[in-house]
Image (cartoon, rainbow, N blue to C red):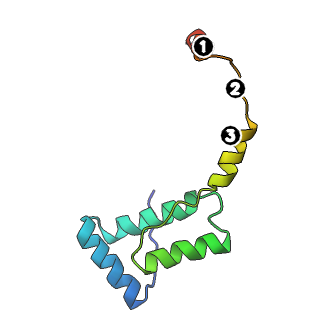
Amino acid sequence: MSKTLSVKLDEKMFENLESTSRKTSLSKSALVKRGITLVLSEKNAFHPEVFSKAVEALINDKPIKNFVDWEKIEESIDKSSPEWETVEEAMSQVRMRK
């Protein structure tokens, strides 16, 4: 079931929303939904700094950057070790799961 949300936008944000809507052929509602989805899907979306950067991007008609902690991912990869010695061993395990 859909719900309706009313949002007040300042003039600049509304103009940017309309402009982006025309450029992309997406409705204003679709753009707002995308922005909300992106912000809510981020693990740290409610961290004040992340949230303010997302709002600032929307106000200034800029793309919202994905807030991925690449350093954390790289560190995790560096600490990990392969479960199998070769690709053939790994593929053998995958085939047995089918």
Name the foreground residue: 92 vs 43: 92
Give, as a three-letter code, the residue at label 2: Pro
| Image point (73%, 30%), residue name | 81
The percent coordinates of residue 77 (x first, y second) are 68, 40
Quick check: 32 left or right of 89? left
Badge count: 3
Q: Decide which of tag 1 and tag 2 comes sooner along the chain.
A: 2
Res 77 label: 3
Q: Secondary structure at mark 1?
A: helix
Which residue is under mark 1? 97
Vertically, is 59 above or below 98? below
**Label 3 crowd (10 A; few <14 / some 14-19 / many >=20):** few
Residue farthest right in this picture: 79
Q: Image point 49% across, 66% down: which residue?
A: 36
Q: Earlier in the sequence, mark 3 or mark 2?
A: 3
Measured in 3D between alpha carbons, the distance from the residue under mark 1 to the one under mark 3, in whole angstroms, is 24 Å
- What residue is rendered at 71% in x and 43% in y? 76
Dividing the image into 4 quarters, which one contains the N terminus? Answer: bottom left
Picture disc at residue 82: 2
* Mark 2 residue crowding within 10 angstroms, few (<14) / some (14–19) / many (20+): few
In the depicted structure, whether residue 19 falls above or below residue 78: below
Snapshot quadrant of residue 61: bottom left
The C terminus, quarter of image: top right
- Measured as percent of width and height from the top left, residue 91 is found at 57, 15
| Front of the two marks 1 and 3 | 3
Does residue 67 appear in the picture of this structure?
yes
Residue 53 pos. (x, y %) = 56, 74
Question: In this image, 94 relative to 62: left or right?
Answer: right
For residue 6, say whether it is visible. Answer: no
Amino acid residing under circle 3: Ile
